Image (spheres, rainbow, N blue to C red):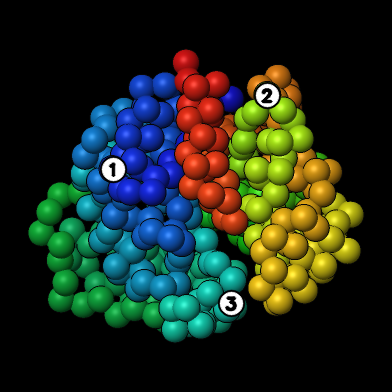
Amino acid sequence: MRLGLGPWGETVAEVLAATSAAEDGGFETAWFPELHRTAFIPAAAAASKTSRIAIGTGIALAFVRSPLTLALTALDLDEITDGRFVLGLGTGVARLNHDWHNAHFGKPVRHLRETVSIVRQIIEASHKGEPIDMEGGDERIRLHGYRRPFTPDRTDIPIYVGSMGPLMSRLAGEIADGWIALELGSLPHFEGEVLPQIEAGLSKAGRKRDSLTMVASACCVIHHDSHEAKRRMAGLVAFYASVRTYTSFFAWHGFEREALAIQELSRLGDTTGMIDACPDEMVETFTLAGTPDEVRQRLAAYEGKVDSVKLSPPTHHVPHEVTREAQHSILELFST
């Protein structure tokens, strides 16, 4: 089983240092998220400082840019990385798209299917000058008289789909080159809910399991005191629990009451209360937080079930020093 890292930094220089350390430590992929930074600019910077580690967006928001912009960005990054780039795309939630980006959300599964289709067509054929036409329910393009006058490094840049729910997971199995998990997750939820939908998508498309790379995600805090590790992680879990869209995910694991309480505390602006309302059992369910032996043991449970695990430090409702120490511990424990 391979390991990736979601590198963090208070500065871009620190992000790049973490990525270089991950490459030196044998990590397979550096995954760059999109929230506090764009996904693509740090990825481009990291590409110029590395030579072996794959560079992926984990994940970039699919609907806040046109498919043409997404495709051209992917082509540029694939050239910069000498063919090491992976385009990870996700929908985000409706409020993020509507209120933060003034972007059209539409029917997200259909919208992402159409976006991926257009991006693939542009990556494959924009250097040929052939017209590209598509009129979908959420996306459209009429690309005539355009030719990208460069020979691409690849015309089949891998596209991964991020998902947690059943319909998007099925779409990943149907159309994606890879699947990447939400930052929070659990092995029982993956095996009981996500994997059957991925397999249904693969079956619908007549694809085999080895045509899809599956990447689990695990937020990680390693500390000699197991309880302290979980308290350092509680802010991240509370952050996700405060998002109403994820209530059913927490309810599936038996934590609906806690999630609803955290949502109410979030509305009151009580961050400390949110964290206090997140018990150790809840943190342990969704993350890798504990002693080195506990973290190794829980990570080993993914062996043979997924192809890779993306490890990342907590970045929400925690001090920078905690994030920095967690990232250092990940690199120290899992570097070859």
Q: Which of marks 1 and 2 is nearer the N terminus?
A: 1
Between residues 218 and 14, which one lies in front from this camera angle? 14
Percent position of residue 21, x then y = 37, 27
Percent position of residue 264, x then y = 77, 74
Q: Give the left or right position of residue 74, taking residue 182 as reference.
A: left
Percent position of residue 214, x then y = 59, 40
The N terminus: image quadrant: top right
Query: Of helix, strand and loop, which one carries label 3?
Result: helix
* Circle on res. 298: none
Q: Can residue 86 be seen in this view?
A: no
Q: Is residue 51 above or below residue 116?
A: above
Question: Could you tell me how many numbered marks the image carries?
Answer: 3
Q: Say which of marks 1 and 2 sits in front.
A: 2
Q: Residue at x 33, y 55 (%)?
A: 40
| Amino acid type of the residue tagged 2 in the rendering | His
| Amino acid type of the residue tagged 3 in the rendering | Ala
Query: Of helix, strand and loop, which one carries label 2?
Result: loop
Q: Which residue is drawn at 51% across and 34% down?
A: 325
Q: Give the left or right position of residue 122, taking residue 190 as reference.
A: left
Q: Is residue 274 visible?
A: yes
Q: Residue furthest left?
A: 149
| Amino acid type of the residue tagged 1 in the rendering | Ala
What residue did someone put label 2 on? 224
How far apart are the alpha carbons under marks 1 and 3? Answer: 32 Å
* Circle on res. 94: 3
Q: Splitting the image into 4 quarters, where does residue 47 fall?
A: top left
